[in-house]
Amino acid sequence: MRKTIINSLAALTIMTVATNIECAGANPLISGSDAPYGTMPFTKLTASDYEQGILEGMKIQNQEIEAICNQRSVPTFENTIVALDRSGRVLNRSVMALSNLEHATGDTTLMNTLTKLTPAMSDHSANIMLNERLFDRIKQVYDLRDKDTSLNDEDRRLIEKTYRSFVHSGANLKGDDRDKFRRLNAELSDLNVRFSQNVTNAMKDTARRMWLKADDLTGIPESIKSAYRAAAAEALADEGKPDDGSLYLVTIFRPSLGPFMMYSDRRDLREKLYKLNASTNMSGEFNNMQILKDIANIRLEIARLMGRKNFAEYQLEETMAGDPATVMSFLGDLREAYTEPMRKEVNEIQEFARRTQGADFTLMPWDYSYWSDKLKNERYAFNDEDLRPYFELNRTIDGVFGLATKLYGYKFKEISNVEKYHQDVRVYEVYKKDGELLGLLYADFFYRAGKAPGAWMTEFRAESKDDEGRKTLPLISIVCNFSKPVGNDPVLLTADEVETFLHEFGHALHGLSSEAKYESLSGTNVDHDFVELFSQFNENFLTRKEYLDGFARHYKTGKKIPADLLDRFVKSAQYGAAYSTMRQLGFGYLDMAYHTIEEPLRASLDIEAFESEAQKPVRVFEPVEGCVISPAFGHIFSGGYAAGYYGYKWAEELDADAFKAFKENGIFDQKTAGKFLKMLQAGDTKDPMELYIEFRGKKPTVDALLERDGLK
């Protein structure tokens, strides 16, 4: 999941969009849109409109904050906490729209606009969070919260979260320390944006692609070859070069890179592509090597300013884990459980390869996908391409959305009366079982040049309610990078891509299902180590026959997945689980290494050596010279997961345990689904562990995860 730029600006995380401010002008970001559901007329908006919306939004919110602070009335929940929560409508709307489009389109003008405005937005954030008069009012309400009998649990939760957010953002600092905190956060926000944009731009670098001939593509399935040929034709046309039909283009974007690494018989080309991908942002115009050091060092300064030894200690205060020791213990327990199974998996793959490659063959990182797939195919007579004909995109959309229908009774209706930011985007109305409209879902499925890599969920507007209970409908978006159709050919997804779709759809359901009153407590505004539960939970259904039989049909024959193929797929699902876990743990250890430093990283620090040492406890392969993760590790340096990447595995423990309840009662059991839906609806209105125990009746353990991975 990707949070918008708001989430990297500490103060804006609690700002919402419900105040009735009358703003004149033709800019719908300021005046509000008269389009259906208040959606944005994207095709009519220019970069200057976004800039005007953000600048005017900050001005309006400043007026709202002044109105709160200048009251003569005694601070109360309504006149201070709620008023603050409902401020910033114009600013939020503008920032969400700009940051989402910048990421999904890669438009250079929008990127420059966001870069230009980031310092002002950071300063605006600091002005709010370091406003002493405002914090004094918040603290008065916080101190008396237990004596106010008119408050319900959600009200108290909002008071506590607002107070802690201000404290976490420096409200208790005095004098020079306040100025320093402001300066550091401004620098950090600018560096976060620069890091992210460098990653996006490096993915478009023409030096990071391979032009190949047909003879270079041995082992590649025909459907993938067609995609490479189409990519070549598009690139040549964009560059105004002739196309004789003989060239194929392979890039480091995941839909292009992944299949090549898995199927190409050309080890030399796999190595070349691996190194092209693993050396991004290390040098040249989009170099992030010094930027990442600056980010880590500024975070350390912020932590010290707040009286903490390191950034992880500071950051983890607002999570389920709570502190670095708990995270490291968690990662260590998984390392202990998965290390030997991982070594066994890798040794088996290497021995398998040596049958044909010779006794001196050594498995390298660019060999793993290729030989792992070959062994899986021999062992289970299963190849990832075997399932592709059964996952035609339109039927898969029906199937993925249909999961919410089976579990929660939701209905989806594609509509055409809402403007889209790109012609490939689809928009759906989402309805509850009783016919009530939940919100809108934007779905942007296809890769295009400039689009950021990966997949994510975000929102253009979050759910909330006014005092009369009238609901602001959420506008939720999921973005993927599936290969576009070639000619009249259908779009056929791999099982891995279906899993990605299910994952992001789980986040979307979290945003759509929200029933919180206050926007800062709604939807996905929960702890980072809790938010992935709802996305990863959905992935469990991909190996269940009773689910797949509902939509997975061969695109030519219309037949269901044959029982033997499905059985082989299910049995192969555990294959490589230990390797995959150790790889994830490697990211987690690297994240914690950067954020548990207690002395600044030197400008001369060798990032390759630092990364190698950090990942040593869970290393699968020896480091390859010139190849590192760090300078393109957007999750922790620009994506809101700093000291939080462990959360994916933490949430896996939760999702495996949660799905076990469904396996015990029936995977579509309505009573179990109803209890799970209450967690989806709750957002951050309750402590996440309390919510989980209400659903499951107990705390989660790692047992279900080990069982799912075949280790128990």
Image (cartoon, rainbow, N blue to C red):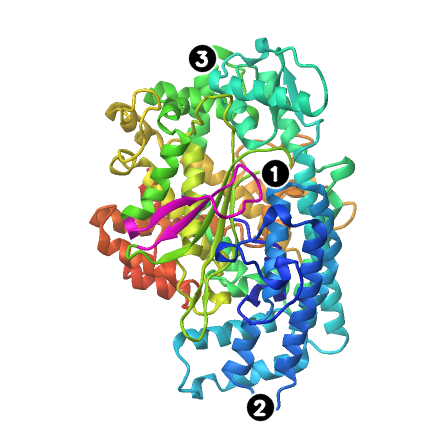
Q: Are marks 3 and 2 in contact (CB under 8 Å)?
A: no
Q: Earlier in the sequence, mark 3 or mark 2?
A: 2
Locate residue 553: give its quadrant. top left
Question: In the image, which is nearer the foreground, mark 3 or mark 2?
Answer: 2
- Disc 1 residue crowd, few under 14, some 14–19, many 20+, Cα 10 Å: many
Residue type at mark 2?
Ser
The residue at the point 43 percent across, 29 percent down is 493
**Which quadrant: the C terminus?**
top left
Structural distance between the alpha carbons of marks 3 and 2: 82 Å
Q: Inspect this view and state whether residue 554 appears.
A: yes
Instruction: Using the image as rendered, state which of residue 155 and residue 572 is in the foreground.
Output: 155
Look at the image and say whether residue 467 sits in the magenta stretch: no
Q: Residues within 10 Å of mark 2 (few under 14, many from 20)?
A: few
Question: Could you say whether the residue bearing mark 2 is in a helix, strand or loop?
Answer: loop
Residue 340 appears in the figure:
no
Amino acid beneath label 1: Lys
Q: Is residue 424 magenta?
A: yes
Q: Is 644 on the left-hand or right-hand side of 202?
A: left
Q: Is residue 90 above or below residue 84?
A: above
The dot on residue 653 is: none
Foreground: 416 or 569? 416
Mark sitting earlier along the chain (2/1): 2
* Residue at the image position 54 percent from the left and 15 percent from the top: 360
Q: Nearer the viewer, mark 3 or mark 1?
A: 1
Q: Viewer-proximal residue, 163 or 453? A: 453
Side of 37 where 574 appears, left or right: left
Residue placed under numbered mark 3 in the picture? 355
Q: Position of residue 374 (x, y in %)?
A: 43, 19
Q: Is residue 338 left or right of residue 611?
A: left
Look at the image and give the residue range highlighted in magenta.
407-432
- Amino acid type, residue under disc 3 in the picture: Arg
User: Which residue has dot 1 on it?
Assistant: 451
